Amino acid sequence: MKHDVVTTGNAAGADLAVEVVDTQPGFAALKDAWQALEARDPEGTVFLSWAWLNQAFADQLYRWSVLVVRDGGGDVICLVPLKYRVHWGGSRQEFQTQLQAGGRLLWSEYTGFLCAPGRERAGLEAAAHHLATMPWITLSMRYVAQQGRCRIFTDALEQAGIAVRYQPYMINRGETDNLKCPQVTLPDDFDAYLAASVSRNKRQQYNRFRRKHLDTGDYRITHATEETLEADLDTLMRFWADTWGDKKGRQTEGIVAQYRRMLTAAAHIDSLFLPVLWQGDRPLGALGHVVDRRRGAVHFIMVGRDQTAEEPFVGAALHYHAIAWAIDQGFGCYDFSHGNEAYKYSYGAKDIDVLFFKARRRELTEDNVFDSLCLGAALTRLQGFIEEGRTERAARACAQLARTMS
């Protein structure tokens, strides 16, 4: 299914075409133009790259679309990836379409927009005004690191009659601000990094660990390869589940599956860095990272450590190793990603802020809350209503879907 191409005007009065692409062939056809734009965009990230989103959208039929804005010459100047979810609205008793940033299908650490330099306002305003004409009830975009672009986009949504609210995102019972992302700016030399960014006490701890365990060969660190990938992922996921399973409960299996899918996708596009710390043949811990080679950043995703190991320095040793590796590779940023947990600042990290907004349609009608792209997911929900004996809800759902298909 592909939506119609429509034409809209930008602030300068020039016509722009906005196309909604929501099929794998359509996405594949965008590859050259997408990659040309990501190469030009100074605010792009690996999480907005065609290769990454190709992994995110694979096997996710009818759960995503991309707003593609072209200028009069046919050049792509703006791309907005979206994720779709079907919600049953209890108060109105109907299926509703909810939107998120498309990269969240793969738990992307950062979301946002790709734009041609100098064309951001025109492209984002055109995309937002067209989005306002599409059927959906809410749009939630979390972890947008592009402050200026985000404000342009939400201002345009509000001008189109959509209510927008920026909000905080606290986790761990309000102890952690997940919109703070600590990052370490890396110098050209690891010793220089230790001297400038790490306290004397932490340097001494690391150096003692290195001399006692790494230099002697008592401990060793390996990096996941194509041959070891599955086993190393098994180690990382097992340790993570052992640490967090009691707290996450029934969600643990799904979280582990999603993290595994994310890091496997990174491996498929040569963007995975997964070091494992060993004592002999016994793994003690592992770190998963997504590497942004174009932007020179290493994004820490997750850590797992053997909870029975007596060595307390496992996580720290792996982070120092990863930072040393990033410097050796010529990268300029080690990103601890979401959350201002105190330990991250001991590595010399400084916060960058990301944004989280929710947009909601003010006026709801029968025609503007449900996108036919979500028909398959809605039918699956309908089957569940029938199996659960919710006949009145099922009847209302059938009537709504019949109107949608007529």
Image: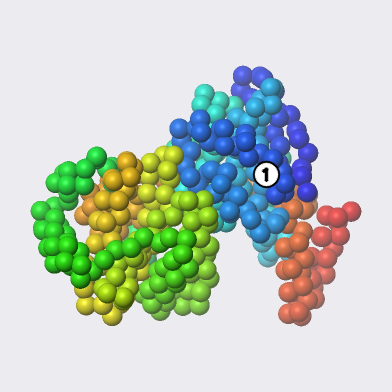
Name the residue carrying label 1.
Answer: 28
Tell me if residue 310 comes above or below residue 67 in the rendering: below
Residue for point 55% across, 25% down: 119
Q: Position of residue 143 (x, y in %)?
A: 46, 49
Tell me if residue 48 comes above or below residue 83 in the rendering: above
Residue for point 53% across, 44% down: 48
Viewer-side residue, 302 vs 357? 302
Q: Position of residue 116 (x, y in %)?
A: 55, 29
Count of all numbered marks drawn on residues in the image: 1
Query: Could one spot residue 170 in this view of the protein?
Result: no
Q: Give the structural element (helix, strand or loop) at label 1.
A: helix
Instruction: Please indicate whether residue 25 sits to the left or right of residue 356 in the image.
Output: right
Q: Amino acid at mark 1?
A: Ala
Colouring scheme, one of rainbow, by chain, secondary structure, one colour: rainbow
Density class for disc 1 (Cα within 10 Å; few <14, some 14-19, many ≥20) is: few
Q: Position of residue 5 (x, y in %)?
A: 76, 35
Residue for point 65% across, 51% down: 64
Residue for point 65% across, 33% down: 69
Viewer-side residue, 275 vs 155? 275
Viewer-side residue, 23 vs 252? 23
Viewer-side residue, 155 vs 318? 318
Query: Could one spot residue 394 in this view of the protein?
Result: yes
Q: Position of residue 163 (x, y in %)?
A: 59, 44
Q: Residue furthest right?
A: 406
Tell me if residue 323 comes above or below residue 285 in the rendering: above
Instruction: Please indicate whether residue 405 sits to the left or right of residue 384 in the image.
Output: right
